[in-house]
Structures are given as C-alpha cells and as structure tokens.
Image (cartoon, helix red, strand yellow):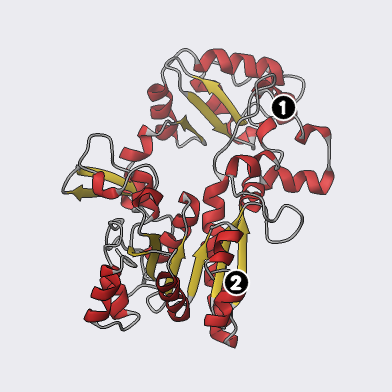
Amino acid sequence: MSGALDDVLVLDVTETFWGSLAAALLGDFGASVVKLESTDTTTRELVDVDDRSAPGAWNSRFDLANRNKRSMALDMSSEAGRSIAHELVSAADVLITDKPAPWLSENGLDYDQSRVSNVSIIYVRGSGFGPEGPDAALSALDELAAARTGMMPILPQPGEPPVYPGHGQMYTSVMLAFGAVAALMHRRATGEGQRVDASLLAGNMYGASLDLQAFLAIGGERFLKATSRLDAGNPMSGTNYPTSDGLWVTLTMPETDRWWPQLAEITGMNAADSRFATHDLRCGEGRLVLMEILDLAFRKHPAAHWKKIFDERQMSADIIETYDFPRNDGMARDNRYILDLEDPSLGKTSMLGFPIFMAETPAVLSHTAPRLGQHTFEVLTDILGYAADEIVALAQQKVIA
C-alpha cells in the first residue's frame, strides 16, 4: 500500500525531540526522510541507539522521534562534508531544521543559501519565538515559550506555583509537519518553494487557545488567575471529584436537567430535593452545597466502582486515568495509537503509534530509528549517485561515517 507522501524527499537537520518528531510524522506517511547527523557520536541525545543492550540505556524518545528515517553522517567541519550536505539540499523537496541561525549560516544551510542550491525548496524551521521581531534569535526552549503564554499560572489550584504543561512541543511538531504539507501543495500548484516557520511560542499559545482566545475576545480577570475546582460555575460539568483510591472522577454534564436524575440516584441523593430542582438552582444558589455533597459521595468508593456505573448507564462521566491506562486501552491499540514492537535487544516493548487515521494511505512503521550513519552509503549511491570508489575515498578522509 502506498503512502500519501511517497514522492517526497525530506532532509532532516534537527537536534531537538520536537523538531525531529515533525520529520518523523512525514516519514510515517511515506516521505523518504534522510537525517543529517554529525560524525561526532556525542551529538546524539543521552545515549546512542547502538547502546540499547545496556540496562536502562534505551533512548525511547530518540526512537520515537527518528523512526522511519535513514541516517547520513557527515563531518560538517570539512568542506567536503558541507558540499555533500548542499547536494542533499539540491535533491530534497523539504528541509526541516531547528538548528540555531548562526550554525545554519556557517554551514550554508540557512534559507537564502539553501534556495541558491534549490529554488523550489520547502524550508521548514522550528524556532523559539517566530521568524520576526527582536526575539527571533532567542534559543528555542519550550519552558521559556510556555512562560509567555499565560497558561502556567492558571493550571494549578490557587496558591500553588505555576505549572509547566510541556505540551507546546507537541503542538509545534504537528504545525511544522502541517506547514510542510501545505507548502508542498502550494508548490504543486505553482512550482514555488517557500520558507515556513512554526515556533514554540505559537505552539504553546495554541495549546491554550480556548482560554486565550476567550480572553482576547472579551477580556476579564477570571482568565488571569488560577481557579479552585470548587469555583466551577456548573457542579456537573468540567468538575472533578476525588475517589477513595486517589483517582478522580470528571463529570461532563452541561445539560444538568438531562443527567440530574441519574446522578442523584448513583450518589445517594433525592432527585426531588428542592435545593436542586432546576438547572439554575444547581448552578446558582445550590451550587456549593451540591458540590460538597458530590465531593463526599465520590470519596466513598474507588474509581473502578464509578467507572462500572458510568459505563453501564452510558453517563457522560469518566475516570481521570494515569499513564498506565492508555498502554492497555483497547481503543488506543485498535486505532494504532500504541504499537507493540519486538526488539532484538529489548524484547517486547511499546511505542506511540500514529495520531492520524487514513483509510487508503495509512501511516506505517517501516523501521525503527537508525544507527548513526547507518544509511550513509545508501544515500550517497541512491540519491546522489556517487560511485563506490568515491564513497571509499570519503570514508578514508573521515568525511562520512
């Protein structure tokens, strides 16, 4: 079965997890992704994948972000190494990078120099704060980008320190991949390449888009401060209650008239209680009393008790799970959101799968992350047309690995 991006060659010049993941997303759907790496093995994060046999040494983040790629190792400090990199730029449809601007300029891989090699190149750069403005050259650190969005102070309960959400990187990865595909569609229609940028600042802002857009539209102090769970406007919607075993129930019942009889029954309340007889009373005058009763009721039983009731009655409520839940969730596995792998060194292990379903051109895991320089010979011969003796000479000069 063919992939949606089978005819696309991507040059991956990334070093961060989120930048590398953007290129992997393109590879999942058929793009041929060449990861350009340094011959210096210390450039790989934490541990090289060659060390997976050592206890605890498997770099699972690296494997996730670099699956479905071929590794090309070059000595970029040499003129010959930079020359080969420029040849790859000439052959590529898309170049994805998160490298600092000075490094890109020094190695002839910034947009202006890349465009000289390939006028129709789609040049996709992951930045910290966007391509324009006084902070365009700042380091691309997600913690700093998240700190600017306004989300961190409102995540904890009042009085607690700000919480770093950590999800801005994932939004930015998807935006980089989406930007690449959108630019490819434009090039297919016009023949024009272009520069694309997706930043950690934008990724974090879109992670907070529901509240941030509401604040931009109407303003108001309530968007600027942490809110206690007991200050929710509707005790039955978007409100969480602790269970006896430390997990939490979340209720999603904005239409309280519909759900009130069942909720009252399972929590031991009288549905005819005059204090909660209407939606306005439940969300107004009786709100705090109702929340106190629900808080005590849900504490009486463990999460599994409430989960069983919710499922049997098909109620709009669920349990807030921990990370061990999706690993064994049937829906996650049926939809290939989690994959089981057999590794020669590790045995059976699991990896995040594919967040997008496509019926005719589905994502495929063709191979796990490559060893450093594993495909250097293959790339030089298949993509750049080098002869075997030329490759041997480059290896002897330590230009390639």
| Residue receiving disc 2 | 111
Residue 3: name its quadrant.
bottom left
Compared to residue 326, the image places residue 10 above or below, namely: below
Residue at 28% across / 49% down in the picture?
A: 49
Quadrant in which the N terminus is drawn: bottom left
Q: In the rendered structure, are the residues bearing label 1 and label 2 in contact, judged by CB atoms less than 8 Å apart?
A: no
Q: Answer yes or no: is residue 118 visible.
A: no
Tell whether 276 sits left or right of 346: right
Q: Position of residue 393 (x, y in %)?
A: 26, 75
Tell whether 370 sits left or right of 271: left
Eye-nearest disc, 1 or 2: 2
Amino acid under label 1?
Cys
Amino acid under label 2?
Tyr
Residue at 58% across / 46% down in the picture?
A: 168
Q: Position of residue 72 (x, y in %)?
A: 34, 66
- Sort mark 2 into few (<14), some (14-19) or many (20+) by Cα contacts within 10 Å: many
| Residue receiving disc 1 | 283
Question: Regarding mark 2 in the picture, which secondary structure is present there?
Answer: helix
